[in-house]
Image: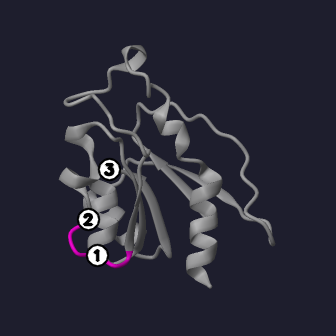
Amino acid sequence: EIILTFAKKTTINSRTINFGGKNNSIIILDIGLRLDEYLSFISRSSYFIGPSTGPTQLAAALNIKTVGIYSPVKVHSEKRWGFYENNNAVVFTPKVDCPGVYSCLFSKCKYYFCMEQIKPEDIVEYIRQDRR
């Protein structure tokens, strides 16, 4: 089972990813949960994939195998917000020397589309290899 969670104002853009083998059901969960409910919910997960935000840090703190997706912008970076001594967490971040310090420079940056370097298929392959 694959469960997608999001904030109430999030726009969901989707594309199909072949997870291989058996069919997986996808559940979309509108995050209207209290913190204790959310922690209980994610604590039953085998893996957690998320951006460099609180829920991702919580999953890692619960010792769930965690994949963090981090921006290369200095104040958003793994160096600042990465996982503290956690062998169950891995970070995916674009391999660029980002000129942005406080935010993305958007079209003024030669690496503007750098987050597209992180492919969903690469994360799925990482999890497949990790499960072996």
Label 1 to label 3: alpha-carbon separation: 15 Å
Dot label at residue 21: none
Q: Secondary structure at mark 1?
A: loop
Residue at left offset 47%, top offset 35%: 114
Residue at left offset 27%, top offset 46%: 77
The verdict on residue 114 being magenta is no
Q: Main secondary structure of the magenta part?
A: loop
Residue, disc 3: 52
Q: Are marks 2 and 1 in contact (CB under 8 Å)?
A: yes
Dot label at residue 86: 1
Q: Nearer the viewer, residue 63 or 121?
A: 121
Q: Nearer the viewer, residue 57 or 79?
A: 79
Q: Residues within 10 Å of mark 2 (few under 14, many from 20)?
A: many
> Where in the figure is residue 76, as x and y percent of width and height?
25, 42
Label 3 to label 2: alpha-carbon separation: 10 Å
> Where in the figure is residue 43, as x and y percent of width and height?
39, 74
Residue, disc 2: 83
- The amino acid on which the numbered mark 3 sits, given as a three-letter code, is Ser
**Residue range of the region highlighted in magenta in the rendering:** 83-88
The scheme the figure's colours follow is one colour
Q: Secondary structure at mark 3?
A: loop
* N-term-proximal mark, 1 vs 3: 3
Residue 50 relative to residue 82: left or right: right
Residue at left offset 34%, top offset 67%: 59
Residue 65 relative to residue 127: left or right: left
Quarter occupied by residue 109? top left
- The amino acid on which the numbered mark 2 sits, given as a three-letter code, is Phe
**On screen, residue 123 above or below 108:** below
> Where in the figure is residue 64, as x and y percent of width and height?
39, 75
* N-term-proximal mark, 3 vs 2: 3
In this view, which residue lies farthest toward the bottom? 132
> Where in the figure is residue 23, as x and y percent of width and height?
79, 66
